[in-house]
């Protein structure tokens, strides 16, 4: 069956702890249901191993397929990190280690998702470091992986980039490669002023728009608001668009 449109989301769930200080897994599941997205990248997710398994809870509550991307063993919250939820089949995946010595371990999930009739979507979901030097290394690494891959369908890079500097090198490199999409503010959830959560799509023509999900529940359930992107896969099937995808060199850090 042909799939012409997809909705993607990225959501830092803050370990399920809302702005009221309460740990409330069902509230997070309700926000995920509100998003009604086909693919959702999650950050700050408990992944079981001796503690609550938020990803298993969300999978059971929503019916999505799930993919864990642990990055560390948290002293309180157990196995912890990134995750993907998808309504479509995840046909291949790998974990990328983006850790910088001396800092909190970081990573990315690099997944291939089958979207019907020969169209596959490459999704790279990540949560970058707090320091500028970390983010420069991590974005270079991610763009190097994008450039090295032979995937011919659309590619999406999304997640919590922790990037406060609008003119910093990481954002310049990403805009140069993917184009400059809208970047609405997502943090803090009560009164957002910073665009920490981002979505890039290549080819740029596939991107139909980017919005922030601002419901009463999403303002309470986490310290980040979810960000959403609509993709038009019909545009991605045009050979001239796919053939125009070019790799770029990333300037030294």
Image: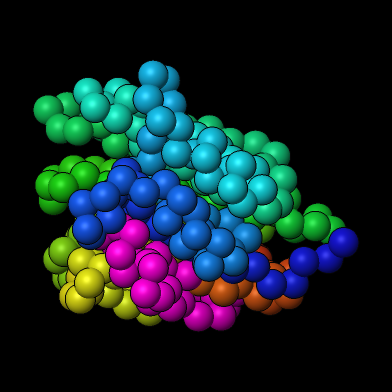
- Residue 163 found in image quarter: bottom left
Is residue 236 positioned above or below 13 on the image? Answer: below
The residue nearer to you, when weighing 40 against 78, is 78
Colour mode of the rendering: rainbow
Quadrant in which the N terminus is drawn: bottom right
Can residue 39 be found in the magenta stretch?
no
Q: Which residue: 59% across, 48% down? A: 61
Q: Which residue: 84% across, 58% down? A: 117
Residue 59, image x, y percentages: 59, 43
User: Magenta residues, as a range?
Assistant: 203-228
Residue 143, image x, y percentages: 39, 50
Q: Which residue: 77% across, 66% down? A: 3
Residue 242, image x, y percentages: 65, 66
Residue 107, image x, y percentages: 36, 37
- Residue 225 found in image quarter: bottom left
Looking at the image, residue 247 sits to the left or right of residue 131; the answer is right
Can residue 208 be found in the magenta stretch?
yes
Q: Residue furthest right?
A: 1
């Amino acid at each position: 069956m042909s799939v012409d449109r997809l909705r993607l989301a990225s959501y830092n769930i803050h370990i399920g702890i809302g702005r009221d200080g309460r740990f409330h897994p069902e509230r997070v599941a309700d926000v995920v249901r509100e998003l009604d997205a086909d693919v959702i990248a999650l950050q700050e997710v408990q992944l079981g191993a001796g503690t609550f398994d938020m990803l298993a809870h969300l999978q059971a509550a929503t019916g999505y397929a799930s993919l864990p991307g642990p990055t560390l063993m948290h002293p309180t919250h157990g196995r912890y990190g990134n995750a993907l939820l998808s309504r479509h089949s995840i046909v291949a995946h790998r974990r990328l280690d983006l850790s910088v010595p001396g800092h909190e371990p970081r990573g990315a999930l690099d997944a291939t998702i089958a979207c019907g009739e020969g169209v596959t979507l490459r999704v790279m979901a990540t949560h970058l470091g707090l320091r500028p030097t970390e983010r420069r290394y991590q974005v270079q690494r991610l763009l190097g992986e994008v450039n090295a891959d032979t995937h011919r369908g659309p590619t999406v890079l999304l997640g919590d980039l922790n990037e406060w500097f609008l003119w910093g090198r990481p954002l310049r490199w990403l805009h140069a490669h993917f184009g400059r999409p809208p970047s609405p503010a997502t943090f803090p959830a009560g009164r957002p002023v910073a665009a920490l959560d981002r979505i890039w799509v290549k080819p740029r023509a596939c991107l139909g728009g980017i919005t922030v999900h601002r419901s009463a529940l999403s303002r309470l359930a986490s310290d980040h608001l979810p960000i959403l992107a609509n993709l038009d896969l019909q545009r991605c099937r045009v050979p001239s668009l796919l053939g125009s995808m070019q790799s770029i060199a990333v300037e030294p850090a």
